[in-house]
Image (tube, rainbow, N blue to C red):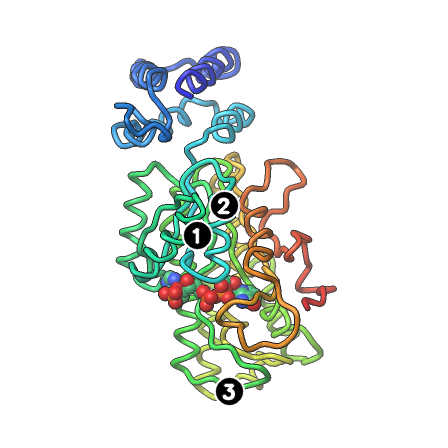
Amino acid sequence: MGLEAFLDLTKFRQRSSTSGPGLSLEDFIALSILLVLLATSATDEDPAHPYTHSRLRSIFPKSEEWILRMIPTSNTDLKKDFFLTRRNKVAVVTGGNRGLGYGIVRKLCQSFPGDVYITCRNSEDGAKALEQLKKEGLNPKVHILDITLAESIQEFRRHLENAGGLDVLINNAATAYLHTGVVAEDVKTAEATLGCNYFGTLSLCEELFPLLRPFARVVNIVSSCGVFAITGNEPKSEGIRKKLSNPNLSIPDLNDIMKGYLSSVANGSVKEDGWQDIVVSSNNISKIGLQTLTSLQQREMDGRRGEDGIVINSLHPGLIRTEKAAEFPGHMLSIDEAAKGPCEAATLPPGPDVPKGQFLWTDLRVVDWINGPIPWCL
Ligand SMILES: NC(=O)c1ccc[n+]([C@@H]2O[C@H](COP(=O)([O-])OP(=O)(O)OC[C@H]3O[C@@H](n4cnc5c(N)ncnc54)[C@H](OP(=O)(O)O)[C@@H]3O)[C@@H](O)[C@H]2O)c1
C-alpha cells in the first residue's frame, strides 16, 4: 500500500506539472517527507510495523490537507483518484449499539475499506455490541457520543480530527415515543424528541461537516411517517408544506419552523396550526425537519465546497422489526434487510446522476415528498 500511495502521488506530480501551478518550497518539502514515509509505511493491518497509516496520520495530521492544497481545485479527477482509492477511510454510525444502527455497522464492517465507528451513549452497550460483532470476525471502533450534549459532540470532533477526518456519517440516532393514531403530546416529550432527532443531529453535523473529506457521504435517517404527517388534504398542512419547500428557506428559518411546532404543542394548537394529518407525533415532525434540513445542508455544502463532491441525502429505511417497533403488527424488514439502503447511500459512487440533497426510499428511489406520489411503505 505504501508503494501504491507513492505511485498515486507520483501520478499527481506528473499531472499537476501540466495542469496546475508549481509547488511552493514549503509544500515541496512537506510532500517529500510524506512520500518517503508513505513509501516505507504499512497499512493498519500490520500493527507491528513502525509506520502504520494510523501512526503516520497522528504524526502528520495535516498531510491530506497539504496534498489537497497542492491539487489544483479544477482537478477533480485527481482528487477522485486520491480519495476514492484510499483504504484507510472513516465511517461513523450514530446510535450504532442497537437496532438499525447496529445492522448498518455490521454491514459496513463487512465491506467498508477503513474504520467503522459505533457511537453510543453508554459504554456497556457499546462493549456488548462490539463483543457480538467480534464473534463474527468484525472489528468496529466504539466511541461514546450523545448527540444532545455539546461537550460530547465536541470531544468526538476532536477525536476524529486526530484520526484525520471523516468519509461517511450516518445520522441514525433518534429517540421516539411511538403511538398509533393521533395523540396530543406533552411539551417535555416534544422537546426531547426534536432536541435529539432534529436539533441534536443538526449540532453534530455543524461540528463534523468541516472534517468531511472530499467525496464524503452523509445519510440522514428519516421516516415515511414524517411525510405522512404533512401529506393530505388539510388546508393548513398545505401551508406547512409550502414553507418547507420554499427555495429560499435557510437553516435558521427551518429552526424557527421546528421551534414553532414546539410552541404549537405548548399552546395546545397543533392541529389548528396545520401540523395535522393521519399521524401526528413529534417523531414524525422531527423527521420531516431532518428531511428538509438535508436539502439545505447539500445546498450550503455545494456553495462552500462544490468541487469536493460531497453528497448528503435523507433516507427512509423501511419499517423495521426493532425493539422500538416490536409491538407493531404486520410485515417488517429485519435489521439486516433495512441496513442495505443506508449502506448503499453511504457509498454512492461519484457521478452526474448521483442523488444529492434528496429524500430516498428504502431502495434508493428518489421520492418527491412535497408533490408526491409517496410509495406505500408496508
Ligand atoms: N424502526 C423502524 O421501523 C423505523 C422506521 C423508519 C425510520 N426509523 C429510523 O431509523 C433509526 C433507527 O431506528 P431504530 O428502530 O433502530 O431505533 P432504536 O432501536 O430505538 O435505536 C435508536 C438508537 O439511537 C440511540 N440514541 C437515542 N438518543 C440518542 C442520543 N441523544 N445520542 C446518541 N444516540 C442516541 C439509541 O441509544 P440508546 O441505546 O442509548 O438508547 C439507539 O442506539 C431512527 O432514526 C428511526 O427514526 C426506524
Q: To which quarter of the image does residue 61 belong?
A: top left
Residue hosting label 2: 108
The correct choice, above or below, for 283 with respect to 292 in the image is below
Q: Amino acid at mark 3?
A: Ala
Could you tell me if the residues under marks 1 and 2 are in contact, i.e. CB atoms within 8 Å? Answer: yes
The N terminus, quarter of image: top left
Q: Amino acid at mark 2?
A: Leu
The correct choice, above or below, for 109 with respect to 263 in the image is above
Q: Residues within 10 Å of mark 2 (few under 14, many from 20)?
A: many
- Mark 1 or mark 2: whose residue is earlier in sequence: 1
- Mark 1 or mark 3: whose residue is earlier in sequence: 1
User: Where residue 93 is drawn, which disc sits there?
Assistant: 1
| Residue 314 location (% of width, % of height) | 56, 56
Residue hosting label 3: 184
Could you tell me if the residues under marks 1 and 3 are in contact, i.e. CB atoms within 8 Å? Answer: no
| Residue 323 location (% of width, % of height) | 48, 70
